[in-house]
Amino acid sequence: MSMRSCRNWFRAIGVLIIVVAVVGGWIAWDRGFREQPQPAWVTADFETRFKYGSIGAEHDAGIPYWIFYVLPRVFPEKLTQDGKVLPGGYAALGVPWEQGHELPAGFTKKTIGFPRVANNCAVCHTSSYRESPDSNPIFVVGGPANTTNVEAFFRYLIDCAKDPRFNADILMAEINRVTELDLIDQMLYRFFVIPITRKRLLEREQQFAWIYRPDFPDWGRGRDDAMNLTKYFMIRAPMDDTFGPTDMPSVWNLKKYVWDKGHRMNYAGDSNDAYSVIMDSALGLLGAAPASKDDFVAQVQWLHSYLSELPPPKYPFAVDAARADAGKVLFDANCASCHASELTGRPLPLADVGTDRGRLDSWNKGAAIKANQVVKEMGLERRGLVEEDLIGYVVPFLDGIWLKAPYLHNGSVPTLRDLLEPAAQRPTVFWRGYDVYDQTKVGFVTDTPAAQRVGTKLDTGSRGGSNQGHEFGTALSAADKEALVEYLKTL
């Protein structure tokens, strides 16, 4: 072979290598990393965007869509609640699933190379209620996620990853039964996506270790352990013995919180303002620093603007106007000094209210300082968490109080009518997470066979579940209590 032929041959090989590298690089980028916008319907209106719009969590916390899809088919026995296996896939966890939608509210789908599923703020802030057992649910954005069992969802993903059946052969066989991936995606899933997903889920196990402790009761539907989540995920603190479950909060009408008036956010007043709370909550969902700081800040700003103006939901059932008028007089005499005064929105010392202290003990000044430093190192600015020891719980605003059941910060009192009884006379065991509404007692039905079948049991003698404290209005007559409750429906 001549020298010229050799040069031509090597040149051709070089060109081929370059072409293969370019094509291979483009395929790797396109199928592994190229970010595509969500469909236009997701951002067609503010409410839909809140329920299904991405906040960027798909990058580090996203689950590949087809893995997410087939997990309940491969591991149905791991979907459990109160030790019982739940039929019905993810819907059995009480997630607010609108008819005709591919995913529940609070679950986002976005393609970053391949479709991924993650969460947004609606997963903890979408309420569900029904007028009767035969009614379709009505979903309220910005309300507490009263039916959702977040802890069971966390456990489910980890428990699946710990199972040796979480492997490419078994998952790909199930994926192939429900969809037809092209050759590239077949290879991508088999050799990269499935092994990496399993590895990342197993890495979460240590951070979630405290939800497996036998000495800690389950959170149950509609609750989480927010500040321990912050400790173990944001500042990577070692696990301690604190346990502070709380109800998911409502996030409507956030403009009512005014920093200059001494208002503080979260149940224990551990955050300075609504913008900070939204940013910190969103970072918790991301599980890492945002992939794009500018995009993330824009999302937080939009959420802050939307939730500041989102009105509280009006009571949807009939109200006895005359009785409510009488109840307002009673409210002004017995409740307004805390719930409609300069004290509202500000922390009240624990000794004054006497409720369960678990939530207070789960957070401290040192943790706040570390968390603020972590966020600052991400290049993000906000007023942040309050760098001081906590004294008690914030006196809540009562707008939309009818939809915030169960009551007290830890959700240990099922209805407003029960809250007006002395602690010794309140229910000691009830079931949370059933969404049929009790129009008489103002709260949700908690003790019927259906409520027991669907809900999670809360024993007020369990750790973090005490129903003690807030014994205000308990000396009123039965008729006056009913009038007061009727007025509270109108707030």
Image: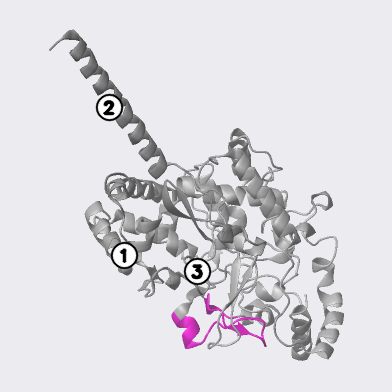
Question: Any magenta on residue 449?
Answer: yes
**Dot label at residue 359:** none
Q: Amino acid at mark 1?
A: Val
Colouring mode (rainbow / by chain / secondary structure / one colour): one colour
Disc nearer the start of the sequence (1/3)? 3
User: Of tags 2 and 1, which is closer to the observer?
Assistant: 2
Instruction: Give the image location of residue 488, x and y in percent.
Output: 76, 78
Helix, strand or loop under label 3: loop
Picture residue at 46% right of the left edge, 79% below the top: 454
**What residue is shown with label 1?**
178
Q: Is residue 144 left or right of residue 186?
A: right
What's the CA distance linking mark 1 and mark 3? 18 Å
State whether residue 417 is above or below residue 345. below
Q: Residues within 10 Å of mark 1 (few under 14, many from 20)?
A: few
Disc nearer the start of the sequence (2/1)? 2
**Dot label at residue 16:** 2
Q: Quadrant of residue 475?
A: bottom right
What's the CA distance linking mark 2 and mark 1? 37 Å
Q: Residues within 10 Å of mark 2 (few under 14, many from 20)?
A: few
Q: Quarter holding the N terminus?
A: top left
Picture residue at 73% right of the left edge, 50% below the top: 273
> Is residue 119 among the parts visible in the rendering?
yes
> Is residue 213 among the parts visible in the rendering?
no
Picture residue at 85% right of the left edge, 64% below the top: 341
**Dot label at residue 101:** 3
State whether residue 100 is above or below residue 352. below
Name the outermost residue toward the left: 1
Instruction: Give the image location of residue 444, x and y in percent.
Output: 60, 80
Q: Amino acid at mark 3?
A: His
